[in-house]
Image (cartoon, grey):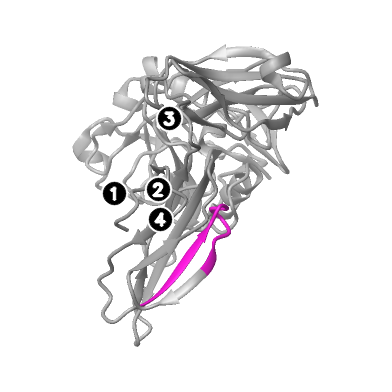
Amino acid sequence: MDYPAAGAIIKSTSLTLKWTATTANPNYDISFGTDKENLKIISQQTINSYTLNNLEKGKTYYWSFSAINECKRGCSSGVGSFTVIPDTNLPYVTTTPVPVHLNNSAPVGGNVLYEGPSPVTERGAFWGTLPGPENTGIKITNGMGLGQFSSLLEGLGQTTQYYTKAFATNSYGTSYGTEVMFTTGLSASFGSVSDIDGNIYKTTRIGTQVWMAENLKTTKLNDGTPIQLITDNNNWGDVPMSPRLCWYNNDSTTYNSKYGILYNGGVVTTDKLCPVGWHMPTDEEWNTLEIYLGMPENQVGSENIRGTDQGSQMKSITGWTNQVNGFNTSNFSGVPGGVRLPLGTFSDVGQLGQWWSSTKHLQYDFYWSRSLESDVSGVERNVLSMQCGSSVRCLKN
């Protein structure tokens, strides 16, 4: 995709899309609209450009193309976007939607897409229980300049309707995003479960599921069999089917209470790691969690990073590098416990949380996993080698 660049800001209400494709003698399907998840085909053609007219100011548009040749072979682009800004010297800011599923805390914020002819010196959000929060609500400031920003409101009323609106100010004045309404849920409530070692974990209900809200720390299978502790890098991955565990950097004192234990794929195959009455979640059960948190169903089966803010809903509100923390409105409390790589080295503590599923790849000795990353708001789905060391969350039967 060549033009416009992803996230481009334009001032004209007309725009010509241009792109390149390597498919020989292609026919292009051009999809376009304001709903990223529901683009409509607007043209089927053989040339690699398309002119859009009568665009509306103050709107963000999305587009993509598919190129298919006469042999039905081809390629598809990703989804691009551009925003048409109003004719004004004021900044252009959008209000970030608030997650649908939350307790009595909520993230509010926005995205300054365009500063105008002078820098944005203040940005933030207004919020309150009445429409028009910029007139009746509370103001929160959050930095300056371009880009996304967010603040977490805590201790809100239960099952209460709120309104929020982002703002940005430059020397010409203040502009506002659209008003967003959200309704809080009940205060967070937690149960508990213990493992065979006597460790006690918080548990939380998310939709129809009950999850551990902490990473597993057991050193035994639930039948009492000890899991082998491997500290030597050379020995970590040499017998991948053998159940093994470790602490990050082999340092249980520093990391056990914060992040729990890293387990290899051999532990996954035993089906005896979680406390009795609990189990390691399947790939499909991870999907159920993500869909409940608002991930489009047509994305859950994809690989790599998917969704919108589901990762932010799952990440803990502290502990992530560069202060790119989550909102934890799901109470999943995902922490960045890092990983152990097949050659035995440790990586990414503070930046990455990675959890096993119990679902094996259909063709290879790999298992599906989920990952949260410090600078990513979605959730990553990928397969892991049996030699990897990753965290575990258990799900109630």
Is residue 83 something one can see in this rendering? yes
Is residue 218 something one can see in this rendering? no
Which image quarter holds the C terminus? top right
Which element carries disc 1, helix, strand or loop?
Answer: loop
Q: Which residue is mark 2?
A: 266
Q: Which residue is mark 3?
A: 261
Tell me how far mark 3 sits from mark 1, CA to CA.
19 Å
User: Residue 375: horizontal and vertical position, in percent?
Assistant: 39, 32
The tag on residue 239 is 1
The amino acid sitting under disc 1 is: Val
- The answer to which quarter of the image holds residue 347 is top left
User: Residue 348: horizontal and vertical position, in percent?
Assistant: 31, 30
Tell me how far mark 4 sits from mark 2, CA to CA.
55 Å
Q: Nearer the viewer, mark 2 or mark 3?
A: 3
- Residue drawn at (65%, 29%), measured in percent from left and top? 203
Q: Which residue is mark 4?
A: 15
- The answer to which quarter of the image holds residue 30 is bottom left
Report the side of 373 relative to 142 (left or right). Answer: left
The amino acid sitting under disc 2 is: Gly
Q: Which residues are magenta?
A: 27-41
Which image quarter holds the N terminus? bottom left
Q: Nearer the viewer, mark 3 or mark 4?
A: 4
The reply to whether the C-beta atoms of the residues labelled 2 and 1 are less than 8 Å apart is yes
- Residue drawn at (35%, 87%), measured in percent from left and top? 70
Q: Is residue 244 above or below residue 361?
A: above
Q: Is residue 145 above or below residue 362?
A: above
